[in-house]
Image: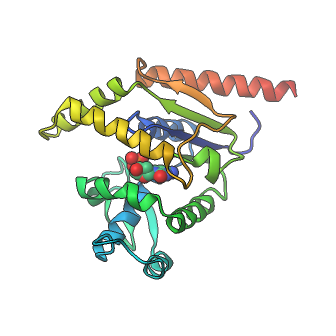
């Protein structure tokens, strides 16, 4: 593959391990990793903290005012093991992963004004290339010209099992059936919203990781890199 740094988009359904895979790819390539979902979660928290999601929801003027003042950034965590999300200089990583934000984020990420602002920030982050970004609209809207587009999926049953193990491992009292229903509901919302619905880009490569280990996924990625490389050399 040529020496120029690549832009890599990883989109797909919720709870199928996009972040883990995208992070591993970024590490392998020595690139920046950006979790675009964390950005929508951080805006949602900002809306909640201003009490803007109460009642009939915010008016356009308040949304624009808030978006004008919002600053989202990522910094390495103290132990260096992950990247934490900051909202206006404050570490909000823990808060944005909680249930309250999770249950409001679909509503906020439907807003055209919010999406415009996030897409602009995301493109700015990718200005110097050498980036792996995961989300729902990265290969279709944010970086339609990305060098590699991966669309990740897994069966709803497998995704529910994985999430169930993760949550019960943290001591949460949840039912497998509820989780499965929630996953199917989120797929439906993501795929059917008016603004930037979740779609596979025509030039994306699909990977169903239902029965794959993280190591097998990386082998698949290495093979993909090789194939792209040989295609580029033939040109
Ligand atoms: O990937 P995640 O579950 O952390 O994403 C949180 C929410 O943000 C999810 O409801 C979908 C939405 N999202 C989006 O609309 N566009 C993106 N590029 C990333 C996430």
Residue 13 rendering spot, x and y as whole percentages: 45, 37
Picture mark count:
0
Please name whichever residue, 209 or 232, is drawn nearer the observer in this view of the structure.
Answer: 209
Identify whether 102 is placed above or below 111.
above
Q: Is residue 173 left or right of residue 117?
A: left
Res 137 visible: yes
Q: Is residue 158 above or below residue 49?
A: above
Instruction: Classify residue 83 as left or right of residue 25.
Output: left
Q: Quadrant of the C terminus?
A: top right
Given residues 65 and 112, the one toward you in this image is 112
Instruction: Write the residue at 50% across / 51% down.
Output: 193
Please give the name of the residue rendered at 80% of the width and 30% of the height, measured from the top-left corner: 232
Closest to the observer, 151 or 29: 151
Q: Is residue 206 above or below residue 123?
A: above
In this picture the colour scheme is rainbow
Instruction: Name the spot of residue 209 as percent of width and height, x first.
Output: 45, 23
Q: Among all residues in the image, which is located at the extreme front?
A: 56
x and y, in percent, of residue 148 in the image? 65, 37
Q: Give x and y (percent) for residue 64.
A: 49, 78
Location of the N terminus (image quadrant): top right
- Indicate left or right for 148 with 160 as reference: right
**Which of these two is toward me, 122 or 78?**
122
Toward the right, the furthest residue is 235
Q: Residue at x 54, y 64 (%)?
A: 112
Q: Is residue 78 visible?
A: no
């Amino acid at each position: 593959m040529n020496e120029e740094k690549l832009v890599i988009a990883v989109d797909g359904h919720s709870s199928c391990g996009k972040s883990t895979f995208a992070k591993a790819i970024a590490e392998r390539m020595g690139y920046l990793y950006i979790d675009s979902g964390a950005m929508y979660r951080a805006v949602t928290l900002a809306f909640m903290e201003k009490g803007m999601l109460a009642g009939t929801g915010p008016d356009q003027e308040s949304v624009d005012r808030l978006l004008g003042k919002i600053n989202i950034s990522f910094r390495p965590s103290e132990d260096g093991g992950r990247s934490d999300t900051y909202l206006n200089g404050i570490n909000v990583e823990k808060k944005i992963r909680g249930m309250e934000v999770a249950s409001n984020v679909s509503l906020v990420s439907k807003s055209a004004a919010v999406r415009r602002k996030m897409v602009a920030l995301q493109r700015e982050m990718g200005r110097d290339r050498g980036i792996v970004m995961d989300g729902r609209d990265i290969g279709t809207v944010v970086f339609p010209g990305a060098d590699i587009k991966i669309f990740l999926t897994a069966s709803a049953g497998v995704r529910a099992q994985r999430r169930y193990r993760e949550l019960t491992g943290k001591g949460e009292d949840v039912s497998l059936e509820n989780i499965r229903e929630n996953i199917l509901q989120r797929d439906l919302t993501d795929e059917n919203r008016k603004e930037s619905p979740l779609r596979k880009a025509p030039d994306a490569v699909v990977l169903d990781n239902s029965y794959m280990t993280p190591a097998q996924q990386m082998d698949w990625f290495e093979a993909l890199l090789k194939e792209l490389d040989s295609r580029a050399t033939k040109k």
